[in-house]
Structures are given as structure tokens and as C-alpha cells.
Amino acid sequence: MVRETHGKTARVAPWGGRWMQLAIGIVCMSMIANLQYGWTLFVEPIDDKHGWGRTAIQVAFTIFIVTETWLVPVEGWFVDKFGPRIVVLVGGALCALSWALNAVADSLALLYLAAVIGGIGAGGVYGTCVGNALKWFPDRRGLAAGLTAAGFGAGSALTVVPIATMIETSGFETTFMTFGLGQGLVILVLACFMTDPPKMGYGQSRGTAAPQRRHYAPQEMLRTPVFWIMYGMFTMVAAGGLMVTAQLGPIAADMGLVDAPVSILGLTLPALTFALSIDRVMNGITRPFFGWVSDHIGRENTMFIAFTIEAVGVMALSAYGADPVAFVILTGLVFFAWGEIFSLFPACCGDTFGSRFAATNAGMLYTAKGVAALLVPVGNLMVEATGSWQTVFYSVAIVNALAAFLALFVLKPLRARYVAAASSTAPRLTTRLAD
């Protein structure tokens, strides 16, 4: 039950309370995960059939990421204005349509159109679920955003093997159609049960009274330096992770590791399939884990730790990735140290700018992922120019090390001063949110 004490207003939450809303968001996120994380499985089969070339095919991935991210603020505005249900309903339908079009695409133009449609749909679902988590859990933003983002990060883990198997046995066209329609249907059903909290972002749980910061509208947020520091850091770290996400299949192919058998803990799988499965799990676990850690030691301290691990992991992958077992383990480490950005940055945004416009504001920050996506084809160009992936690995490691430095020595003191100043001018309100 959720009950707010604010004047004489008292409303009761939907069945299951805020934890049910969180669970719905997690499942919806897992249903759109394959649109991004399953894409690498389709690149080689599409190229084998149509001969369009990896670079041209990966443009579709970039288009998907750009439309998924850059339209989230608009979709977030609809969520803040009309509630989450209608946005997720439309988003689920568009996601299904996107993969159905991929199944029949006989030209790059149609493949790119499907990417646009899928990006709009996935962005609507993603932005809504994260924004709703921030609103329902003002007291546990790191954990709630992390669990929600984990659905997106790990949601494709259970379907990596089925998708790879279906592509092998039935073709990528049938796989696109089957999984696209199935995932879309689940989202449509669950969207019917989504709702806003009675009042957004006015306090902490368990009846504690705490000073509240202003709830900044998007146009106010965009005028603050702290937002642009976060935006730049988000872009830097996201770019490296997206390069690995989109190129993992081609990287394994160029290293001759696609079908190399790997045995770990009694399980034997081809190296690429094994890596994809572990990567999805680690990419999911990291989001609630580092979100929970950041609730206790601070957002910026957690960023410094994670980004440093990412830089070290990428350098290790560069040095030892040609070994099949090392490739599987090190890519898992890389994804573990990367995926947390999708819990840490939204939580940091909510902490700084308040909950009332959380969906829109988090969506504005999330567009940094779209900027980062523009750099994904650069990885292909680097490989074509140098003949190896080493330059890409070195660049990603350097950027992550720089982001770690910025988190601790620039963002942390700047945000501390900003939050202290904003808190001193805000009213005190009390909210009761029973778990």
C-alpha cells in the first residue's frame, strides 16, 4: 500500500504496490533487450544472404540506438503527462513491428526503417520503466533503477542460445518474426497493469521527513553545468560499451573464436555463444549491484570504481582475448563494469533534479547513449584502417580511465555544491511509502 500525507490527500496504490510495478518494469525491459543485445547474432547471417557489408548493416544498429535514445525525452514527457500505460502499449506494438519488418527486409532502406520503428518503440518502453522506478522508489533509486535496467541488460541471456539455434536451423528471417511477435505480445499484456505512484518524488519511505530539493523541469536542468558533466561522462563510457556490444560477433570472427569450444564449470559451448550468454548475465547483475553499492557509498565513488575496472578489463581483453577461455571471461568482466551506467546515471539524475519530472529528465540524460551510438561505426573504420581491433581496445580503455577521473575529481565536488544549494531552498514534505 502507498499512502501519502500531504494536506488531506490519501490514495491507495494498485495491487502489489510499488514492488509489483517494479517487477512489471523489469519484465518489460527484458522483452526489448534482444533488440539491442541480440543484434550481433544477426549481422553475419544478414551479410551472408544479402552481401551488404558489415559496416552498412551496422548502420541499422546505430539508427536503432539513436532513435531509441534521442526520442526518450519526448516519450518521457508523455509519461509525466499521461502516465506510463499508453506509452508502453504503443512501444510494445512498435517493437513487434520492427522485428517483423527485419524478417522481410530485402533492402538496406527497409532494414533502416525497421531500426527507426524499433528504436522508437524500445525507447518508449525503456524510458517509461526507468522513469517509473525512479518515481516509485525515491528512497532506493540506485537499487530500483539498477533492477529495472538489469531487465534490459540480462533480459536476452536466456534467449541467446534459442535465437542462435533458430537462426542456424530456421534462418534469421523466422527468428526475427517469432521472437519479435512474442516479445511484443508480452509487453502489451503487462502494460495494462502499469501506473504512476499517487504522488511523485515528494519524500522518502517509512514515514521519515527529509528536506526536499526542488523538482527541476527539463529546461531548468539543461541550464546547469552538472547535467552536462554527467552527459559527457555518460557518452564517453557508453560509446565503448556499445562498440563491444555491436561488434562482439565480428571481433570473435576476426579472432577465429566463433566456434572454438570453451568448457567452464562442466559446460561446453562455442566461444561466441558462451561469451554472449555470460555477458548478458553480467550486464544484468552489475546494474542492481552497483546501484545498491551507490546507495551506500555514493554515486561518484561507485562510478570511479566501475570505470576503472572497465579500463583494466578492456586492456586485458586486448592482450589475452585471442585465447577462447580468456575471451569468454574477459568479455564478461567488460560487460560487468560497463552496464552499471544505466543505473548510476539515472539515479544520479533523480537525486540531483528531483522526481516530479524524472521520466523526462532521465530521458534527456539517456540521449547521451544516442550520441555514443554515432561512434559505433568508427570502430569498423579503425579496424579497416589498421587491420586489427587493438586501436579500438586502447581507445575504449583510455576513455573509461578519463571518465573515472572526472567522476571523482570533477562531478563529485560540483554536484555536492549544487545539491547543497538547491536543498536549502526547498520545502519539507512527508510521504509514506509502505514496502
Image (cartoon, rainbow, N blue to C red):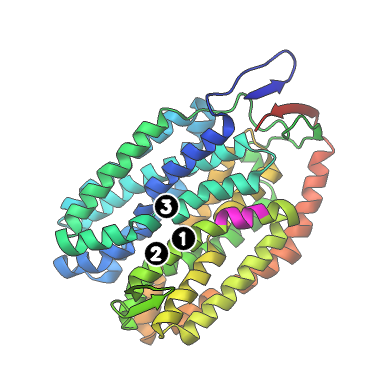
Predominant secondary structure, magenta span: helix
The reply, left or right, for residue 337 in relation to residue 247 is right
Residue at the spot x=67%, y=46% of the render? 223
Above or below: residue 33 compared with residue 327: above
Q: Residue 356 has which mark?
A: none
Check residue 289 for magenta coloring: yes
Pick the residue in front: 115 or 217: 115
Neighbourhood count class around disc 2 (C-alpha, 10 Å): few under 14, some 14–19, many 20 upward? many
Check residue 43 for magenta coloring: no
Q: Quadrant of residue 324?
A: bottom left
> Do residues under tags 2 and 1 come within 8 Å of each other at their CB atoms?
yes
Q: CA distance from mark 3 to mark 1?
A: 8 Å
Q: CA distance from mark 2 to mark 3?
A: 10 Å
Name the amino acid type tagged 2. Answer: Ser
Q: Residue 155 has which mark?
A: 3
Q: Is residue 413 visible?
A: yes
Q: Which residue is mark 1?
A: 281
Residue 347 lies, in percent from the top left, at 63, 48
Specify start and end residues of the magenta stretch as a single range. 287-292
Residue at the spot x=49%, y=87% of the render? 319
Name the amino acid type tagged 3. Answer: Gly
Residue at the spot x=52%, y=71% of the render? 333
